[in-house]
Amino acid sequence: AVAAGLLGQAPAGAPVKSVDAERFNLRDAGGNLRALLGTTSDGATSLLLYNATGVNQAGLGVMADGSTSVFLANPAGRTVTELTLYRDGTPTLVFRDRNGKTRTLMGTATDGYPFAYFLDAAGNNTWKAP
């Protein structure tokens, strides 16, 4: 019944209740990969979204160690924004420039204090708090 439902052969009004798989690929009408939902052999799970040219441009995941991450990339696929929550509960937000260099880093340290760093193109601190 599940296979018939996936092939569009399920009786009308009889939705498939569940599908089990390790990976799902979503393709557009032209056959291009637009999204991937899956797990890896090391225990990570992710949802990756691709633009019309096949470039991975956004995603979210739960890593094997329990850390979670959401990222946004530019049309070339370079990650420019990333929000990560590490397994110890500390969050970090990173902004990168077009060349992939970290320019802003904010978060909360393990002691609970917030931090912020602003970096120039060479990676040098231009401002930080505390």
Image (tube, grey):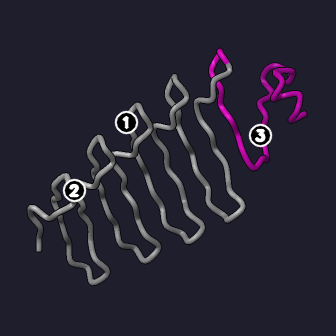
| Residue 40 locus on image (x, y percent) | 68, 57
Q: Nearer the viewer, residue 111 or 81?
A: 81
Q: Residues within 10 Å of mark 1 (few under 14, many from 20)?
A: some
What span is in magenta? Answer: 1-30
In the image, taking residue 11 as reference, residue 24 lies left or right, namely: left
| Residue 50 locus on image (x, y percent) | 53, 33
Q: Is residue 109 above or below residue 39?
A: below
Amino acid type for the residue under numbered disc 2? Thr
Could you tell which of marks 2 and 3 lies nearer the N-terminus? 3
| Residue 117 locus on image (x, y percent) | 17, 64
Amino acid type for the residue under numbered disc 3? Lys
Q: Is residue 94 above or below residue 16?
A: below
Between marks 2 and 3 in the image, the one whose residue lies nearer the viewer: 2
Is residue 75 rendered magenta in the image? Answer: no
Q: Which residue is mark 1?
A: 74
Q: Which residue is mark 3?
A: 17
Could you tell which of marks 2 and 1 lies nearer the N-terminus? 1
Q: CA distance from mark 2 to mark 1?
A: 17 Å
Q: CA distance from mark 3 to mark 1?
A: 36 Å
Q: Which residue is mark 2?
A: 104
Tell me, yes or no, whether the two marked residues, 2 and 1, touch with CB atoms within 8 Å: no
| Residue 70 locus on image (x, y percent) | 43, 51
Between marks 3 and 1 in the image, the one whose residue lies nearer the viewer: 1
Is residue 28 rendered magenta in the image? Answer: yes
Examine the image and state in which quarter residue 19 appears.
Answer: top right
